[in-house]
Image (tube, rainbow, N blue to C red):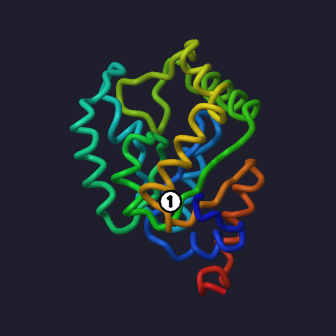
Amino acid sequence: MPRYVSLTETANLLATVGRVLVIGCSGGGKTTFSAKIAESFGLEFQSLDRDVRWLPGWVERDPREQREIIADMVHRSRWVMDGSGASSFDIRLPQTDLVLWVRVPRRVALLGLLKRVSRFYGSVRPAMADGCPEPLPDREFLSYIWNFEKKYAPIFIKQIDRYGPNVPVAVLHSHPEMDRLLQLASQPHARKGG
């Protein structure tokens, strides 16, 4: 079982740690949340979609090359990494100080996807690789979101147990909870660890 931590403990950790991994279902708000964390705490913002997985024209980078890039990224000293690819948890979790799991309800993730597509359709969103304009979601992508909790969340838990059993994991169930965490972590007492 992952080492789950409370919101208060997470706020204290977030204010002091250097390496934060943000995971969760697509459409849940991971990227926006990660960018806010990076800005608030002076961390390098790393996006697996932008920096690792995709090349222009929605061409997927070779998996070995992806792993090499990730291995380099995780050894940097201060970062927040946005990306849920469980296939690289073996590289990322051992170097992570804190996992923030954005685990919003399915309807929230689907609404988030709808908002993203309506805002960026046909253009490249900020945390996406150049030359990868936002498409309309296909059936496979919608199925990923629809079945995330049943099919993918258990894989996340298994991988966290295997590669990061001592890494604190905070589960965030809503956007207000994410905002509250940022607010708590930004308070002076959090930075002192108290």
- How far across and down, in percent of the image, does residue 77 sit? 34, 68
Of residues 187 and 89, the one nearer the viewer is: 89
Residue 59 shown left or right of residue 171 in the figure: left
Q: Please tell me which residue is depicted at 24% across the width and 30% down the height of the picture.
A: 62
- How far across and down, in percent of the image, does residue 8 sit? 71, 72
Q: How many marks?
A: 1
Secondary structure beneath dot 1 equals: helix
- How far across and down, in percent of the image, does residue 120 sit? 56, 26
24 up-or-down from 144: above or below: below
- Location of the C terminus by quadrant is bottom right
188 up-or-down from 175: above or below: below
Residue 183 shown left or right of residue 19 in the figure: right
Of residues 127 and 103, the one nearer the viewer is: 103
- How far across and down, in percent of the image, does residue 86 sit? 45, 42
113 up-or-down from 24: above or below: above
Mark 1 Cα shell of 10 Å, populated few (<14), some (14-19), many (≥20): some
Q: Please tell me which residue is depicted at 60% across the width and 51% down the height of the picture.
A: 101
State which quadrant residue 154 falls in.
Answer: top right
Of residues 142 and 38, the one nearer the viewer is: 142
Q: Please tell me which residue is depicted at 50% across the width and 56% down the height of the picture.
A: 161
Residue 69 shown left or right of residue 154 in the figure: left
- Location of the N terminus by quadrant is bottom right
At label 1, which amino acid type do we have?
Ala
Residue with the mark numbered 1: 38
Of residues 151 and 183, the one nearer the viewer is: 151
Q: Please tell me which residue is depicted at 50% across the width and 22% down the height of the picture.
A: 134
State which quadrant residue 151 falls in.
Answer: top right
